[in-house]
Image (cartoon, grey):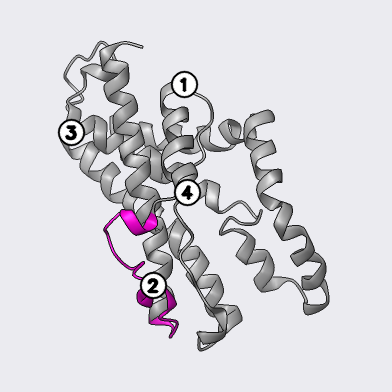
Amino acid sequence: MSGSEIVQSLIFFGCLFVAVILHEVSHGVVANWFGDSTAKRAGRITLNPIPHVDPLGSIILPAVGAFTGIPVIGWAKPVPVNPRLLRNPRSQMLLVSLAGPFTNFLLAAVSAVTARALFDEHAFYATFTDVPIVVRILISFTLVNVGLGVFNLLPIPPLDGASIIERFLPDRALASYHRFRPYGMLVLLGLVWFTGILDRLLTPFYDAAAEFILR
């Protein structure tokens, strides 16, 4: 791996690390708005990364993916939420869950607009590593947040998209669904690592974001 490739891998890893933490913080913020202060009392509504770090999901897997090119899955420690403390548990739990992807899409939009403003479309760049590093960071942050937002909307537990199923499933079906939840992560890892479905899902969104930034 060349020096420029190492720098880009570090940029990607840093962007993913920040995006995952902001994703989790947003869950705690929205839960607190709705009356559940569990995350706040646990010290999880903070931009200090240390309380959010999960060694496997925040460091090891993202780093391996960034430096090897394998599909990347990253996560922080889940923010604790107690649905029973929410004023309207079933409806508000959906909003708490969707706060994470919404935050990622908002961050992607802001960084994409900024990158577009800074990118000089008339300059000649032989490769992506020739693009000014500030713009490269913004483009990487855009793509990371787009990927996280879309990925987390998949209706597979423990992803946030599963909350949509839980919100609209009839009560009689929830018990069966909850029996499936413990196996959701195994299903998710299998889909990501062995089917290539993640690349096919995310590529159109990445292409649209890159086209917006680069004109």
Eye-nearest disc, 3 or 4: 4
Q: Is residue 11 left or right of residue 36?
A: left
Disc sitting over residue 42 in the figure: 2
Q: Is residue 137 left or right of residue 105?
A: left
Give me the C-alpha separation between circle 3 and circle 4: 25 Å
User: Of marks 1 and 2, which one's residue comes earlier in the chain?
Assistant: 2
User: Of marks 3 and 4, which one's residue comes earlier in the chain?
Assistant: 4
SS for callout 3: helix
Is 18 located above or below residue 88 in the figure? above
**Residue topped by disc 1:** 68
Three-letter residue code for mark 1: Thr
- Tell me which corner region of the image, top left, top right, bottom left or bottom right, holds residue 191: top right
**Is residue 37 covered in magenta?**
yes
| Label 3 crowd bin: few (<14), some (14–19), many (20+), radius 10 Å | few
User: Of marks 2 and 4, which one's residue comes earlier in the chain?
Assistant: 2
**Residue topped by disc 3:** 134
Eye-nearest disc, 1 or 2: 2
Rendered location of residue 161, percent (x, y): 59, 58
User: Of marks 4 and 1, which one's residue comes earlier in the chain?
Assistant: 1
Q: Is residue 77 left or right of residue 157?
A: left
User: Of marks 1 and 3, which one's residue comes earlier in the chain?
Assistant: 1
Residue drawn at (61%, 57%), measured in percent from left and top? Answer: 158
Specify the farthest residue to the bottom. Answer: 87
In depth, the one of 94 and 110 nearer the eye is 94
Give me the C-alpha separation between circle 1 and circle 2: 35 Å
SS for callout 1: helix
Does residue 128 appear in the picture of this structure? yes
Q: Which residues are magenta?
A: 33-52
